[in-house]
Image: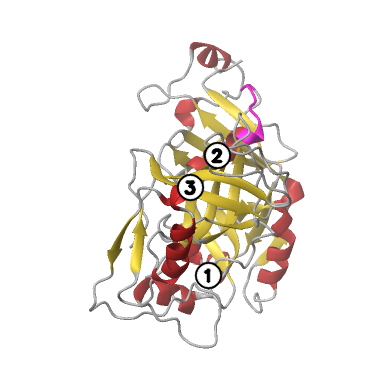
Amino acid sequence: MRAALKVIGLEELGMVRLRGADAVKFLQGQLSNDVARVSAQRSLLAGYHNPQGRTIALLRLVQWDADDILAVLPRELAAGVASRLGKFVLRAKVKVVDESAAWRVQGLVGATANGELHDSADAAAAGSGGAQRGLMPSDLPTVVGAQARVNGAVFVCVSDQPPRWIAISPVDAPSPVLDYPAADFATWQRLEVAAGQPQVYAATSEEFVAQMLNLDALNAIAFDKGCYTGQEVIARAHYRGRVKRRMQRFVSREPCRLSPGDSGQLADGRTFKVVVAAQLADGRCDFLAVAPMLGAPSETGAASAAAGSDRGATAGVTTQAVHPEAPPTTDPTAPPVAGPIMDPTLAPIAAATVAPTVAAAAALLTATSGAAAPAAASSGAVSGATGDATVIADQAELPYPLPT
């Protein structure tokens, strides 16, 4: 058995296949990224959006063959996305099919030494004989987004801290990673959250504009390409607006359970909606949620009121003012209202002092997941709750900077 990698079954992922001479051209008019850059050596993350710029699904695009693109996405969305894309094919020479049942998707997590992968001695020995050499860690791409074909499967590097890949192969072919020990899906989910990787599920489809999911920070939007569905709203948010709500990471202090689509409220008045959640070994929840950024002008009134009613939850929070000459902006990522949303130029901004890895400002979250309420924190900051789950969470840092 080989010990350099661990393999995780990703049965919840499905596959939409697009084949034909116009596959790339067709996708170029539908998705947020520059599909022309997909190649046998490069995959892309792209968003599929509605005309209002809200994300229907996130797709990992992989070239299986010439004029043959595989789009990896949650299995529960595959049929709907294939049907929706199919309505726009018209005369394009491309076939769009949900082939989730025909493909196997597996995750690999690498063991590293000084940041580099090494082939273990037993792996080398196991791969030395036979007509087809077994998969070696050194066969795998090391740059995020790169892909390589090995023994009839495509391997895509999706993260480098720690290194992770997805392996795609036909379901009727032998698994390319049979010789490696298995890990559970919870491990993969925790690594996805720690890497700040968003996902869209049925519960959150068409809930978030692209920038709310940090797709611009993750290079999943090409602002220099031609038109695609939802481009007007997404481009306006990039060039003219100010994105007040973005996906951020939180870690609960007490055991709790959250799921994609769950909503709640922070003690400072900010609301949130869960994107991805992972259960930690001790029962706490590490989760990504879309919430107003600390200091977003549209939230400062509620933040100030909450600070006055709960000083303990906002200890260490300072305020600052927006420059008086700052121009008002319209926020395309905010929910529709009767008129434009104007930013007050002198609103106070709550700014938490950030520790090396965790924001020091603890937030009191009221989650509407319907989970049983945990016991009150030992500090006495939270009393027992009935109905909605009440937990205390710290805001953790993402591994990438957010555009300002």
Circle 2: residue type? Gly
Q: Which residue is mark 1?
A: 25
**Which quadrant of the rendered structure holds the N terminus?**
top right
Rendered view: 24 above or below 167: below
Circle 1: residue type? Lys
The residue closer to the viewer here, 350 or 214, is: 350
Helix, strand or loop at mark 2 = loop
Question: Is the residue under label 3 in contact with that under label 2 (CB below 8 Å)?
Answer: no
Whether 324 is among the magenta residues is: no
Residue 7 falls in image quadrant: top right
Q: Which residue is mark 3?
A: 196
Circle 3: residue type? Gly
How packed mark 1 is, by other alpha carbons closer than 10 Å (few <14, some 14-19, many 20 or more), is some
Residue 283 falls in image quadrant: top right
Residue 380 image label: 2
Rendered view: 40 above or below 169: below
Mark 1 or 2: in front is 2
Residue at (74% x, 61% y) in the render = 79
How packed mark 3 is, by other alpha carbons closer than 10 Å (few <14, some 14-19, many 20 or more), is many
